[in-house]
Amino acid sequence: MLETSVPKQKLTFKQILNMSFGFFGIQFGFALQNANVSRIFQTLGADIDKIGILWIAAPITGFLVQPIIGYLSDRTWHPKWGRRRPFFFLGALFASIALFLMPQSSVLWMAATLLWVLDASINIAMEPFRAFVGDKLPSSQRTTGFATQTFFIGLGAVIASLLPYIFTNVFNIANIAKEGIVPPSVRYSFYIGAVVFLSAVLWTVFTTKEFPPENIKNWEQEKLKTKGVFKGIVEIITGIFKMPKTMLQLAIVQFFTWIAFFAMWIYSTSGVAQNAFGTTDTTSKIFQDAGDWVGVMFMVYNGVSAITAFLLPMLAKKIGRKYTHMLCLVIGGASLVSIFFY
């Protein structure tokens, strides 16, 4: 990786909050997507066995966009915008537009296209954030930085997941609409999500400075040799075949983990509606109540995840990171299996 900064000085807690706040907006949008996109697809007439095909946008854009954006952001420098912040801004801008337009979709292909745009944009904004802590913080403050990001991730996901339920049950906004129309409670949730996503990321962009590489001339020369999407793709593919054995083992574990996550995100609404609420009629209030309840369930899942993230380091000190990971996988797998017996 290219050198990223001048010698790092300790930041104040306020500065760490500012640089991490953008993750609140990113996770806000991500949580709205995970909890409600299947609901929108079904409202627009998608058959349950076709939803998985429509969702293919998410893993494909992650697979393609994340490594390329990571590669390019490592090799970007602008005197005003810095290194990571151009990607924060552009990703947030396009994601917010997609969030605003998604619930206005009148046909299925429009919603599916907007999912591609939304997921790609979220990845553009999110991927450089992972390197931001390493760029800005000395090693002594990185745990605090990652913990702060985790807090904002959890907070954003909890609020966003609960929004349609709040609009329906607290503000008495309708969660039903004519056939083929996304209900007002969901539409308003996405509108708020668009504003929150862009506002939170802009807060980080305008309150956080980035520093140029230590030797800017040498860095620029090295960048000219390596920068380019095609060269980046070649380097990424080459790196895959050269990855250490431990990383390959972890990749296999992650492969099966993400199968489980996507099964949950894609089919929770239809599964809860059919098996717990007893309906497959997407125009009925009962189906939309089920969609609201899925948001509540995702709120709990995100809240527990955020709290647990702070406890895992203590558990890892006692039993080691490998066994901590194994224990979490066992609990997660057993929990998913338990849904079958509901």
Image (spheres, helix red, strand yellow):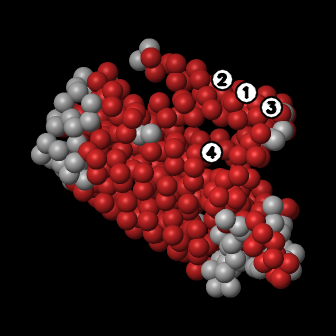
In space, the residues marked 3 and 2 are separated at their CA atoms by 12 Å
1 and 3 marks in contact (CB < 8 Å): yes
User: Looking at the picture, does residue 126 appear above or below residue 290?
Assistant: below
Residue under label 3, please give it.
Answer: 322
Label 2 sits on a secondary structure element that is helix
2 and 4 marks in contact (CB < 8 Å): no
Lateral position of residue 318 relative to residue 303, left or right: right
Q: Disc number at residue 307?
A: 4
Q: Amino acid at mark 1?
A: Met
Nearer the observer, 102 or 108: 108
**Residue 122 placed where, x, y %?**
51, 57
First along the sequence among labels 3 and 2: 3
Viewport quadrant of the C terminus: top left
Label 4 sits on a secondary structure element that is helix
Nearer the observer, 266 or 164: 266
In space, the residues marked 1 and 3 are separated at their CA atoms by 6 Å
Callout 4: 10 Å neighbours few (<14), some, many (20+)? few
First along the sequence among labels 3 and 4: 4
Q: Disc number at residue 326?
A: 1
Viewport quadrant of the N terminus: bottom right
Residue under label 2, please give it.
Answer: 330
First along the sequence among labels 1 and 4: 4
